[in-house]
Image (cartoon, rainbow, N blue to C red):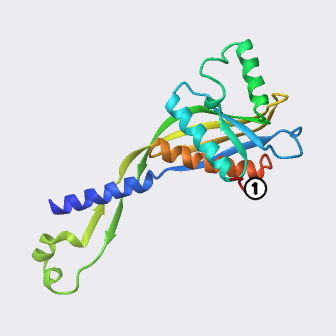
Amino acid sequence: MKKLSFLASLAVASILAACSPSTKIIGSWSSPDKPSTPYENILVTGLSSNLVNRQAFEEELVATLEEDGVKSASSLTLIPLGTAKDKEGMAKALEAVRAAGHDGILTVALLDQTSETRYVQGTTTYAPMGYGGYYGRFGGYYGYYGAMTYDPGYYTTDKMYYIEVNLYDAKSEALVWSSQSETTNPSNLDTFSHTFAGVVVDLMVKDGIIAKSIAKK
């Protein structure tokens, strides 16, 4: 029974290691007509009906942008929920965005959510016992088979989230930058949104969409 418990604990540890969360960019694009100077004041808006998720992503992106010295704000503080559903409401929302001094609008949207089951191969390890004792006689050796141990394989399910981030010019409304990312096995919303924000903002800096500067206190 102790041997089974030990093997079970190994399997659990392997599963946890295999399911560690990760976020990676799978593609990005910049418009050839993008401004020559980086954007300096960005409004972040999550395109989701789930208010908790939307707020988490907007706040994490705003915090990460601010850390890099880029002015930013959450759309939840500027555009009341449900006010930009029609053409007239959208026009008023854009007026408010421009009046607040924002030169870019960053949108975050979940494109797809998938689950993929895969088999993790088991392993067999050999550790012979010293000559003599149990090893020297068949009866003792056969009864004490611990020299050969087997860590069984198992099936695990990976959860993957594909998110698209677009940056629009606040004045012209033109799309100037876009990226898609893949996040595997996020442990919780806070960790997910924090890691995601860091990856996206770093890419925006790399692509010249924003520029790091000393944050103003």
Q: Residue furthest front?
A: 217
| Depth check, front residue: 125 or 39 | 39
Q: Quadrant of residue 10?
A: bottom left
Residue 10 shown left or right of residue 54 in the figure: left
Measuring 12% from the left and 70% from the top, which residue is drawn there? 143
| Depth check, front residue: 173 or 156 | 173
Q: Is residue 149 above or below residue 210?
A: below
Point out residue 43 in the picture as x, y percentages from the top left corner. 70, 35
Q: Quadrant of residue 27?
A: top right
Residue kind at label 1, given as amino acid type: Ser
Residue 133 shown left or right of residue 166 in the figure: left
Residue indicated by mark 1: 213
Measuring 14% from the left and 84% from the top, which residue is drawn there? 133
Q: Is residue 24 above or below residue 114?
A: below
Measuring 56% from the left and 49% from the top, which residue is drawn there? 195
Point out residue 38 in the picture as x, y percentages from the top left corner. 82, 46
Q: Residue furthest left?
A: 139
Q: Is residue 3 above or below residue 24?
A: below
Q: Is residue 38 above or below residue 162?
A: below
* Helix, strand or loop at mark 1: loop
| Depth check, front residue: 171 or 3 | 171
Point out residue 108 in the picture as x, y percentages from the top left corner. 64, 34
Residue 202 shown left or right of residue 60 in the figure: right
| Depth check, front residue: 15 or 188 | 188
Point out residue 107 in the picture as x, y percentages from the top left corner. 68, 33
